[in-house]
């Protein structure tokens, strides 16, 4: 090798380092990661990603059976140390107790992932004050409770990471998702504001703004109005390629952003395009969304007294066809199957999915 080509060696080394880092991501060996809503969907995907990088996990959710399935998988598949506890993030005392248990078990929380959330789908006229309160209590106050519970120890150590999972719905107000949108707009403000204040204390806050992802979570979206039609459009958006993103890849990007300490992470090309469009031409985006509203289902006579019910109870038409097979596959992988499917699991997975896809499940039947 001639002298004038020696420069290629460090260039090749840097390229190899970049490739390895892009492929394998940063490690979290020995660090404790607390993930709210970690029993299914995106929360479980994030738990898997952190576990594959050596982290110890604390996961919480409200459903004990879901938590146990998630814990067992994480231990068996990754050999991870996992503390799983039932916790309603809307209850500050429960969140504080969870952080105390995590600290007693592992010595502290190094990374907090604010992921727990609910989503209501339906026209604004069907949404009650209680729908807005529930969304704010979980999507916003859950984030506040968890952040305030871990901040004292992070600031004392002058080291910590917070990964806030917000939504493109916190940047652009999408019709028929109003309680969710209100809470997510507030969450984006909270996350970015805290990020500006805490960086000087050694705490890195990453605000994640994802678009639609194929997690299977559409089965648990709470529908109001003409429920079957609402579930149908939401299921299609959360299942079709191009519109929705592969959730495993999304989770990997989020954890990479957390490792790097990025301030902001928009996940998915549709979300990036919509965010830029809303910043450059907000009036034009609103005009387009007004046209979208025209093709979405009307309330069908429903009003605020109507109860929100999970999407799996009201699957019909395209929402239970081959068109949503990617979403159904994600639901099976990510612990998103509804209780009726898990009760059938002892018979066969095929039978469970037949029960799930058979059509709307009426209350009392």
Image (cartoon, rainbow, N blue to C red):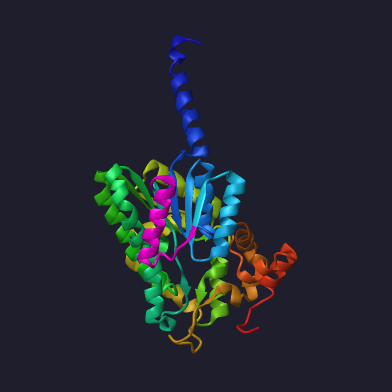
Q: Is residue 99 magenta?
A: yes
Taking the spot 43% from the left edge, 18% from the top edge, the residue there is: 7
Considering the image in quadrants, where does the C terminus appear?
bottom right
User: Which residues are the magenta region?
Assistant: 85-108
As rendered, which of 82 and 28 lies closer to the eye?
82
Image vertical order of residue 6 relative to residue 180, above or below: above
Q: Most extreme residue toward the bottom, as rendered?
A: 301
Asked whether, in this view, residue 4 is left or right of residue 221, the answer is left
Residue 231 place in picture, x, y as percent: 55, 74
Residue 358 in view of the camera? yes
Q: Is residue 87 magenta?
A: yes
**Dominant secondary structure of the residues highlighted in magenta in the image:** helix
Image vertical order of residue 283 relative to residue 2, above or below: below
Q: Most extreme residue toward the front, as rendered?
A: 104
Taking the spot 48% from the left edge, 49% from the top edge, the residue there is: 57
As rendered, which of 327 and 156 lies closer to the eye?
156
Residue 326 place in picture, x, y as percent: 62, 60
Taking the spot 62% from the left edge, 65% from the top edge, the residue there is: 324
Image vertical order of residue 259 relative to residue 340, above or below: above
Residue 54 place in picture, x, y as percent: 50, 40
Residue 178 place in picture, x, y as percent: 40, 73
As rendered, which of 10 and 332 lies closer to the eye?
332
Task: Specify the quadrant of the image occupied by residue 287.
Answer: bottom left
Task: Specify the quadrant of the image occupied by residue 41.
Answer: bottom right
As rendered, which of 227 and 69 lies closer to the eye?
69
Taking the spot 55% from the left edge, 67% from the top edge, the residue there is: 218
Residue 172 in view of the camera? no
Total of numbered circles in the picture? 0
């Amino acid at each position: 090798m001639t002298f004038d080509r020696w420069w290629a060696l460090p260039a090749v080394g840097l390229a190899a380092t970049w490739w390895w880092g892009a492929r394998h991501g940063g490690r979290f060996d020995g660090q404790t990661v607390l993930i709210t809503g970690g029993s299914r969907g995106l929360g479980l995907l994030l738990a898997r990603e952190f576990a594959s990088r050596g982290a110890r996990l604390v996961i919480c959710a409200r459903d004990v059976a879901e938590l146990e399935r998630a814990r067992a998988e994480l231990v068996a598949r990754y050999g991870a140390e996992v503390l799983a506890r039932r916790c309603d993030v809307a209850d500050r005392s429960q969140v504080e107790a969870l952080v105390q248990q995590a600290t007693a078990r592992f010595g502290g929380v190094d990374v907090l992932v604010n992921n727990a959330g609910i989503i209501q789908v339906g026209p604004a006229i069907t949404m009650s004050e209680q729908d807005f309160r529930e969304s704010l209590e979980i999507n916003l106050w859950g984030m506040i409770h968890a952040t305030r519970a871990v901040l004292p120890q992070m600031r004392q150590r002058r080291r910590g990471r917070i990964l806030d999972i917000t939504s493109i719905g916190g940047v652009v107000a999408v019709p028929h998702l109003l309680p969710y949108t209100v809470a997510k707009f507030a969450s984006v403000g909270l996350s970015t504001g805290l990020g500006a204040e805490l960086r000087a204390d050694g705490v890195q806050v990453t605000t994640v703004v994802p678009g639609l992802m194929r997690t299977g979570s559409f089965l648990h979206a709470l529908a109001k109005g003409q429920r079957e039609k609402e579930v149908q459009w939401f299921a299609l958006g959360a299942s079709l390629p191009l519109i929705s993103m592969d959730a495993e890849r999304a989770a990997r990007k989020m954890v990479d952003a957390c490792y790097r300490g990025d301030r902001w992470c928009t996940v998915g090309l549709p979300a990036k395009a919509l965010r830029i469009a809303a910043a450059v031409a907000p009036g034009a985006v609103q005009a387009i969304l007004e046209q979208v509203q025209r093709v979405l289902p009307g309330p069908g006579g429903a009003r605020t007294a109507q109860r929100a019910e999970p999407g799996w109870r009201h699957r019909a038409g395209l929402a239970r066809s081959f068109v949503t097979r990617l979403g159904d596959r994600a639901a099976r992988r990510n612990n998103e199957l509804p209780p009726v499917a898990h009760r059938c699991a002892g018979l066969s997975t095929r039978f469970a999915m037949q029960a799930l896809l058979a059509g709307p499940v009426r209350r009392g039947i």
